[in-house]
Image (tube, helix red, strand yellow):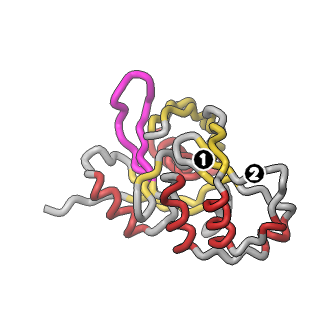
Amino acid sequence: MTRRIQVHQVDAFTREPFTGNPTGVVLNADALSEAQMLAIARELNNAETAFILAPDGTDHTVRARFFTPRAEAGFVGHATVAAQYVLSRRFDAPRWQRQKSKAGIVDIEVRGTDAERRIAIRRSPPTIGRELNDRERLAVLDALALASESLDPRIPLRIVGVGAARLLIGVRGPEPLKQLKPDLASRRRSARPATSSSP
C-alpha cells in the first residue's frame, strides 16, 4: 500500500509567489524514516526541506528535522519560518512555540493573521569558532575565485554558528561579491575537513 505524503512548498521572506527562499515543509512526519526524509528532500530539490514531528519531551512543543538533498542539517532559519507559517495556518498553532532540532531548542513567536503572519525566531547568539589556517584560507579563496586583496583584514576567515556551522568571510564592500565565480565542487571538497556545515 502506498502512503500519501502532503508536501507544502513555501517561499519564506516574501509576499510574492516564486520569490523569496523556497522550502519544502512536510507535516506529521513521525512515520517517515531518515532515508525517506532524505529521499523526499532530494526529490523536492530545495536548498532545505523541513519535516515536522511531535514533541519527544516536555521542554518543547514541536520537533523539526531539516534535510538538504544530500544530508541532514542541524537548524535552518528560513525552513523554520516556512514550517511555522504552515503550522500556524493549518492548525491555528499557539502564538508561541518551542521548536527542537538537532541544534537545540529555539523559541518562536507567530504574529499576525492569515497571509500577513510574521515569524520571529529567538535563539542563542552564534559561537565564534576558530580561524582558518593558511592552507584552508587559500583553498576557500581558490574555490570562490576571490582575490586575497578583496578580504577585509579586520575580519579573519573563521567558522561561526549555532548548530550548522558557517564560514564567515569579510570582504571590502559589495564589489568582490558581485565578481564571485564559485567552484562549488571545489568548495565542498575544501570544506569537508574543516567543518560539517550544510551547503
Q: Quadrant of residue 61?
A: top left
Image coords of residue 122 (percent x, y) = 63, 33
Q: Secondary structure at mark 1?
A: helix
Q: Visible in this render: residue 14?
A: yes
Q: Amino acid at mark 2?
A: Pro
Residue 89 seen from this side: no
Residue at x 29%, y 44% (from the top left corner): 30
Does residue 63 belong to the magenta stretch?
yes
| Residue designated by label 2 | 156
Frontmost residue, 12 versus 173: 173
Classify 181 as above or below 195.
below
Q: Quadrant of residue 7?
A: bottom left
- Taking the spot 49% from the left edge, 60% from the top edge, the residue there is 192
- For the record, the magenta segment spans 50-66
Which element type, helix, strand or loop, lies under badge 2? loop
Residue at numbered disc 1? 114
Quarter of the image with the N terminus is bottom left
Nearest the viewer among 90 and 69 is 69
Magenta region includes residue 112 = no
Inter-mark Cα distance, 1 to 2: 44 Å
Residue 184, position in %: x, y?
A: 56, 73
Q: Residue 105 at x, y = what percent?
A: 50, 32
